[in-house]
Amino acid sequence: MIHSKALRTAFIGVSCLAMIGVEGPSAHAAPPVNWQVCDWYAHPTPGGTDWSKYPVTYCADITVPMDWYDPSKGTISIRVTKVPSTGDSARRGILMVDPGGPGSDGSTLATKTAKSEPSLLSAYDIIGFAPRGVAPSTALDCGIDWSKYTPVADERDRSPANTALQLADARLVGQSCGAAPLAPYITTDQTIRDMDFIRALLGEPKVNYLGFSYGTWLGAWYAATFPSRTDRFVLDSNMDWRATIKDDYVDAWARGFARRFEVQFLPWLARHDDLYGFGTTAQQAQASFDALRTAVAAQGRGSSLDLLQAQALYNADGWPQWAGVLKALQADPAQATKLLPAVRVPTGKADSGAYWAVTCADTPWSHDPASWVAEGDVLGAAYPLVGAESTEEPCAFYPHTSQHPAHPGADNLPRMLMVQDQYDPATPIEGALEDARESDQAMVFVRDGGNHIAYDTGNACVDAHVNDYLLHGGAPTSAVCEAMPLPLDDKVYP
């Protein structure tokens, strides 16, 4: 479907796309793109972001094959955004940015990056996009009937009746998403070909790239598939892009959240016992949290407490507010139904069809329900915070698997710059270190850092190393940066 004048201008017929092929288009074949000021920039939502304080951002909808391997199947729309470089003759190309997900709209990331990092805007046109399957690009609607979904009150309950409920919920999400006509074509392999098409449309020989979280997986796959078109790539908060998504989003996920909870959150809570009253040692704080969880579980909100605690671990800026909720619950556990809404698993992701399509199709998953009960038993015992939720795995019931995985490795990757916090909960350090070792990549390592995302979050050391590489090039080099103090702390506590 053609959505705008910009799309009509950028449209390439199916026959032309067929000639391009899956290896990607060349820059000289690209037609012009008719950029227009983004509607959300020109007409901001009342009470929302004041975009007038940000650089002007332009939008275009481009058309790509639904299936790059068979363009006769039709086309879909991809929303692209651009903040033009301010550097005139100093401009050196495009910097494509991706916020992660999968399933996250990156349309405004270019705008935010341009505002916070003006030196990058001097050197690059900064390019954002909403990946295929994610609105305002052609979106994947799973059509899930949420009235048939029953939130699991306590994922740690390993009774047959409770694990059967976990599997039923997983089946609903996995089968519903798999039945969507667009689902087989929402994969990382298809998305990187969209990225290369954007590169060609813009007339650029190479892509510079800044990707976060899943954006590191996306960037590594692009670099492995199109190494000659890869220039300066920065991968921040790295998934283990040499492994499987299951390894990343189940096993490593459970370990990473448990570690940050134990190593950083509980000691932080204990250091501020005067404010929150959970005890003056990490051991006392753990005991108090466990007692609180038992009381909250009795109110039917055990899973909610675990999963919202896990969400809080992404970024410590929210810890004082979250600890205030814990304090209120400790004073009156009966407030749990008010303060802790029932949640779906995993929190915040079940609404995104693109999340499930990419997660489930990029690499193989077991489709044996019994294996997922066993997985939840094992991970729940080892990592109580979120380990047991692994039984509720929609990918066990998702019918599609990509036939074209990129498998980044030591022999098909150019040099890139990795950035990694030591205690990142969502993308744990082990995978990043192994990726760096196996493929000889440089890394900016943030000692005692624990947030998920390190660049452009206030750490001057990290920002300096990343910007120096993106602006001046040369071989990427490794460095160690120190973390910033956690909220309310006067220093960094190892």
Image (cartoon, rainbow, N blue to C red):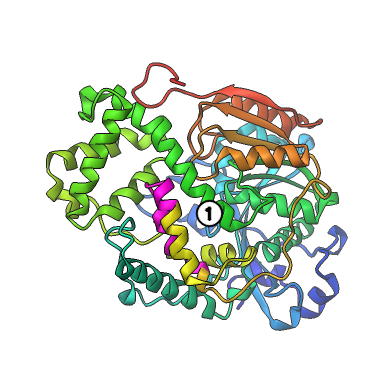
Q: Is residue 265 left or right of residue 191?
A: left
Rendering quarter of residue 444: top right
Q: Residue at the far bottom: name it.
A: 72
Q: Which residue is mark 1?
A: 249
Q: Quadrant of residue 275?
A: top left
The residue positioned 61% from the left and 74% from the top of the image is 400
Q: Position of residue 224 (x, y in %)?
A: 78, 52
Can residue 114 be seen here? The reply is no
Mark 1, Cα crowd under 10 Å, few <14 / some 14-19 / many 20+, is some
Outermost residue on the top side: it is: 490
**Three-letter amino acid code of the residue under disc 1:** Tyr
Residue appearing at x 33%, y 68% in the figure: 160
Q: Position of residue 9 (x, y in %)?
A: 70, 69
The residue drawn where x is 67% and y is 75% is: 66
Report the span colored magenta. 379-395
**Residue at 57 percent of width and 71 percent of height:** 138
The main secondary structure of the magenta stretch is helix
Residue 121 on image: x %, y %: 66, 38
Between 321 and 368, the residue placed more toward the observer is 368
Residue 216 seen anywhere in this rendered image of the structure: yes
